[in-house]
Image (cartoon, grey):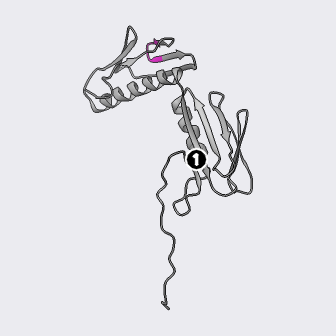
């Protein structure tokens, strides 16, 4: 059996899980999430736990077993607690400002980049003097949050020589040594 797939998912109080023919809906205090699933995986709700079982031991079915368990567990966690990611802008003159669902980024290009974020995501920027600006993103949908963070990060990936760019808070960027001047060679 899959180590992840066989773990039961606990449903906290105030969370409602509906299992349909080919989709699972999770409703909680932070929102509602729905995902489709393959019928080769059987999903059962017993009391306040959800268990997943698979129909065969084929390689693709084994992979789907752990995948759907992780997706449903993330949905339950998302609608009860939510998810948060923080991005840090490292570089001279890099700035971020959030007004409503618009995020305005100044990343050293000739123009500012303005992104309209989905309504499911809450954005906040922290600009303290002497520290790098931080973009704080919160959502109940982990997949959407990860996609938005990847899109923002793609505008200025961290480069290995000076370490400038957009990175996650706590991310370690491997640094490379720059060019060294040759001594006396002609």
Expressed as whole percent of the image width and height from the top left, the position of residue 175 reads: 48, 61
Extreme residue toward the bottom, this view:
186
| Residue lying at 58% horizontally and 44% vertically, measured from the top left | 87
Residue name at image x 28 percent, y 20 percent: 55
In the picture, measured across the screen, residue 120 lies left or right of residue 28, that is right
Q: Which residues are magenta?
A: 18-24
Q: Position of residue 52 (x, y in %)?
A: 34, 19
What is the residue that sits farthest to the top in this orientation?
47
Pinpoint residue 110: horizontal percent, then vertical percent: 74, 57
Up-down: is 70 above or below 157?
A: above
Q: Residue furthest front?
A: 130
Q: Residues within 10 Å of mark 1 (few under 14, many from 20)?
A: some
Reading the image, the residue beneath label 1 is 153
| Residue at x 51%, y 80% (from the top left corner) | 181
Residue 164 shown in magenta: no
When the figure is inspected, residue 21 is found, relative to residue 121, above or below; the finding is above
Please identify the quarter of the rendering in which residue 114 is found.
top right
Residue 36 placement, left or right of 40: right
- Res 1 → quadrant: top left
In the image, is 37 to the left or to the right of 156? left
Count of numbered badges drawn on the protein? 1
In this view, 168 is above or below 158: above
Residue 73: x, y in percent? 43, 24
Given residues 160 and 144, the one toward you in this image is 160
User: Which secondary structure lies at badge 1?
Assistant: helix
| Residue depicted at 51% across the width and 60% down the height | 160
């Amino acid at each position: 059996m899959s180590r992840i797939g066989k773990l039961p998912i606990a449903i906290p109080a105030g969370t409602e899980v509906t299992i349909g023919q080919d989709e699972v809906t999770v409703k909680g205090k932070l929102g509602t999430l729905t995902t489709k699933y393959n019928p080769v995986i059987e999903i059962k709700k017993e009391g306040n736990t959800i268990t997943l079982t698979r129909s065969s031991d084929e390689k693709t079915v084994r992979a789907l077993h752990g995948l759907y368990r992780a997706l449903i567990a993330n949905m339950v966690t998302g609608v009860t607690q939510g998810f948060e990611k923080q991005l840090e802008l490292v570089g001279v003159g890099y700035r971020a400002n959030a007004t409503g669902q618009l995020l305005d980024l100044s990343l050293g290009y000739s123009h500012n980049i303005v992104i309209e974020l989905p309504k499911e995501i809450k954005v906040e920027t922290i600009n303290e003097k002497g520290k790098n600006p931080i973009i704080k993103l919160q959502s109940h949908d982990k997949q959407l949050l990860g996609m938005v963070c990847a899109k923002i990060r793609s505008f200025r990936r961290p480069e290995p020589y000076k370490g400038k760019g957009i990175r996650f808070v706590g991310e370690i960027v491997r640094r490379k040594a720059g060019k060294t001047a040759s001594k006396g060679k002609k």
